[in-house]
Amino acid sequence: MKSGAGSLAKELASIRVLVPAVIVAATALAYYSYRYAHELARRGEQSIMDTNRDLAEGMVKRIEQLVVDSDRTLFELVDLRNLREFPRRWSDIVRLSPAIESALILDSGLRIVPDGYVSKKHSKAEVELFRRLFEREIRPKLDLESLAPDEHKHLHREFDGRYYLISYTRRNVDGRPYYIALEGDLAYLVGEVFPESFAGVDARRLYQVIDEHDWVVFGHPFAGIPSKYMVTLTFSKTLYKWRLRMAPREAPVLMAKESTRRAFDVVLIALSAMTVFVGLGLLAMTVRNEQRVSQLKSEFIANVSHELKTPLSLIRMFAELLASGRTKGPESAREYAEIITRESERLSRLIDNVLDFARIERGKVAYEFRVGDLAEVVARGLDVYRHRLEREGMKLQVAIQSNLPPVMMDENAMTLLLLNLLDNAIKYAAEGKELAVSVSTSDERVRLSVRDRGPGIDPQEEDRIFERFYRAKNVRGRPVRGSGIGLSLVKHIAEAHGGGVTVESVQSPAREKGSTFTAWLPVYEAQNPQDLGSSLSPKEETTAA
Ligand code: ADP
């Protein structure tokens, strides 16, 4: 048994190392699964966003290219050597070219050359208004002097609450610089070029062109689109003040999916971690219990061996004395025989207990239940026991209530229960000299109580004394014989009968000390009163032994 306890201690030591290792492994696993799931989701999203960005970049490039190309073509058409032709030719060009609103030619002094301004604006007033705006506000912003020959630039700006796109270049003729400026038709750009350019974008995407105040110039409303799913790009060559924004149409769904997934991951990981921790906790508890039981078992084996050895040595010694005829007289021969009887009784009860206990442990115990009167069983048990009590010099009080209702019981088991309680009373409470046994009924229960005037039981141990192998602290190490299975048998028997066992104990010297063990059984409810027969013989008895 020692080696059993030793190997258990070794197992415990390895479990002590194993538990933190499992915790670390489980935490690492949880962390990496979370990271992996997160990374996978992030990559999925990233690929959606990458496609989105590629598409938006393509769109910006295309629109800017369109603007630049159309401007270049128009610049090519200006013949600066033949400026007299400009108004006539350009009136037609401007009228026919939908992408521009006006065209202006400036000389080296940055003044508009005579007849160097053509426009398709509707009224003269509008034409004049733009000329003034150009000369006062726009021209200074163009920084024409710093323009290199054939360099092509754009100005995109808001003047008086309206956006203008000016495309301009410098041409040298006979060493003298001229400047050509084209006013782009933004209404045409937004109304015709944008729709045509965006027509190819697939239906799974939302897009919009917004100005510097975030007002939508063109495209879809973006309400409810989380900003992390949007890509925003500027038109860096032409329409500086506007930006293109694009997002997957299912962005809100993606967002919802992501938060669900996150919540799911967290719950799943927390649950798995909890399962591991609870499992480890249970394992630790089981191991600790096993260790305790194993220790108790080894004590039990030692106790039982001792319990067997003592009566056997006594029996052998006195039997040998009797056999050799070396007795002092018939008186001592009778005394020897009594000792032999007493010790063999104790031996057989111990063996009964151990056998019953072993049967319970193996789950093999079978009770033979019959309807009967507990009072009768108790009375018979006490008869058997009475001479032992006399021998110990104990006073017995018996109080059996009359008209007790029947109970369903195994009589042998109930006798064993009673004898165990009486044995304990003699073993632990003999100095009290007083013992009271009562059988009574109330609340549909029949109660059997054994009260002694012994030392009582520590309240903290009141529950534990019913555990198998458990012996109270005050008897451990003291030479009170016992194995720690008596009360666990009592409890098992009472519970197998649908009842239970309780103990009340007084240890304080201020009150009368002692313990009262009460086993109770439920009253038998007869389906048919004739079932009971006439076996019940109610009686009330109070005796002093
Ligand atoms: P055992 O008597 O073989 O030790 P039991 O299961 O019968 O085992 O009892 C368990 C423990 O309960 C005993 O060791 C003892 O400490 C305590 N005990 C039982 N009966 C009494 C009693 N009448 N008075 C005081 N202590 C008791």
Image: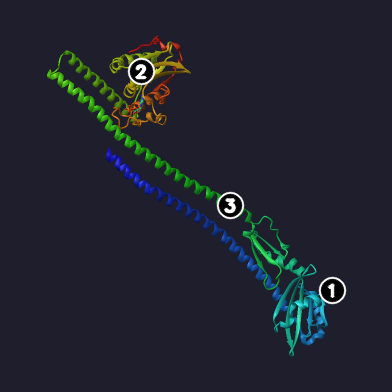
Q: Is residue 417 above or below residue 45?
A: above
Scheme by which the image is coloured? rainbow
Most extreme residue toward the bottom, as rendered? 174
Judged from the image, the secondary structure of the residue bearing numbered disc 2 is: strand
For residue 189, which quarter of the picture?
Answer: bottom right
At label 3, the amino acid type is: Ser
Q: Is residue 428 visible?
A: yes
Q: Are marks 3 and 2 in contact (CB under 8 Å)?
A: no
Q: Which residue is mark 2?
A: 434
Q: Which residue is mark 3?
A: 259
Mark 2 or mark 1: whose residue is earlier in sequence: 1
Distance from disc 3 to disc 1, alpha carbons, whole Å, reads: 56 Å
Give x and y (percent) for residue 514.
Answer: 39, 23
At label 1, the amino acid type is: Leu
Q: Is residue 162 above or below residue 309?
A: below
Dot 3 surroundings within 10 Å: few (below 14), some, or many (20 or more)? few
* Pick the front one: 227 or 450: 450
Q: Nearer the viewer, mark 2 or mark 1?
A: 2
Q: Nearer the viewer, mark 3 or mark 2?
A: 2
* Pick the front one: 106 or 274: 274
